[in-house]
Image (cartoon, rainbow, N blue to C red):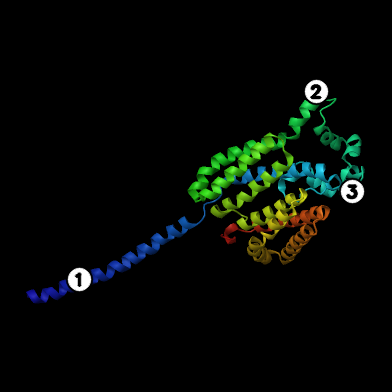
Amino acid sequence: MHPKRFPFILLALLLIILMVPSGCGQKQSASQKPQSSAGQKPKAPPEAEDMLKQITTVIGELDRKTRMKKVPSLQQAAPGGVEGGQGQGSQGNQESGGSQGGGSSSGGGSQGQGGGSSSGSDQGKEGGQKSSSGQSDGGQQKTPNQWQKELQSLKIIHSSWNKLEPKAVEAGLPPGDRENFKLALNDLTIAISNQRLEESLLAAIELYGQYAGLARIFTMPTPAEFYEVQYGVMSSMAEASRGDWATATDKITAISDPWSVLLPLIGKKDTMLAQQTDLSLKDLQDAISSEEINLVVFKGDIALNNLKMLEKKLSKPQSGSQSSS
């Protein structure tokens, strides 16, 4: 009797042992689900979008000022691909290029600013920026006012970053990316505070370039590669405008890797727009190679407009099938 009971006990133990792995297996697969969802990027906080909007506003404003100062005959060709430019009439300038262009380039050539400032009211504001003579009351008001929009946007960027930074760290923003963002923001703040136009534009574009790091750790409608490509276009145009053709060439060449990732994505949504954008980027590269600033402005603006349409295409459908790099 005792020997007979032993096999039954042994059999019961075997059944328990066999059942344990299957139970563990079920628990493992159940616990894998939270892991996969935990491994997924968290949704971008609203501060990230607010910050991007203000950065593009600053770039649009500074770009408009730079064009009026350096290339008055092309000031109507403000950056269509930069959202911020719309607020201060860059979109309107593009659409009414004939009438605006006539007023700004009537002074003739690339240095028609003096002639234009006496006839055009908008040009007069810019013309009055450098000379403080004969403007005791108005002169003091105009200088801060010309930078008021940038200063307001800058305040919002600082506030948004303060709220976003701990969330970005929690989401896995690398220390190097975090430090680079802070340095770029500090450089922009100092340049705008001192009203250094060229320096401010370069710093604002550099800050925009750092946004790609946030797009890598947060779920956003637009992939990180988009920001890298647009940064390369804006940065190369800015460097070309200051005559640094070697750096401009480096910046536009650097977009080839992110663009090779982005091109198939947009190709699935709009083949024609993908080809159109691809050709416009190649045209901009050729324009930079030719070292002709007027050509760079036109080709660059076309590329930025295409990128703007591309961004809308990318963000329209569900953001689930975006690039995850």
Can you identify the residue that label 3 sits on?
A: 98
* Left-right relation of 185 to 84: left
Give the mark, 3 or 1, whose residue is nearer the N terminus.
1
Residue at the (81%, 45%) spot, across then down:
92
Residue at the (89%, 37%) spot, across then down:
114
Tell me the SS state at disc 1: helix
Question: Which residue is nearer to you in this view: 118 or 202?
Answer: 202
- Closer to the camera: disc 2 or disc 3? 2
Mark 3, Cα crowd under 10 Å, few <14 / some 14-19 / many 20+, is few
Kindly indicate the quadrant of the structure image that contains residue 10.
bottom left
Q: Amino acid at mark 3?
A: Gly
| Numbered badge on residue 137 | 2
Q: Position of residue 231 (x, y in %)?
A: 67, 53
Q: Amino acid at mark 2?
A: Asp
Tell me the SS state at disc 3: helix
- Closer to the camera: disc 1 or disc 2? 2
| Numbered badge on residue 12 | 1
Q: Quadrant of the N terminus?
A: bottom left
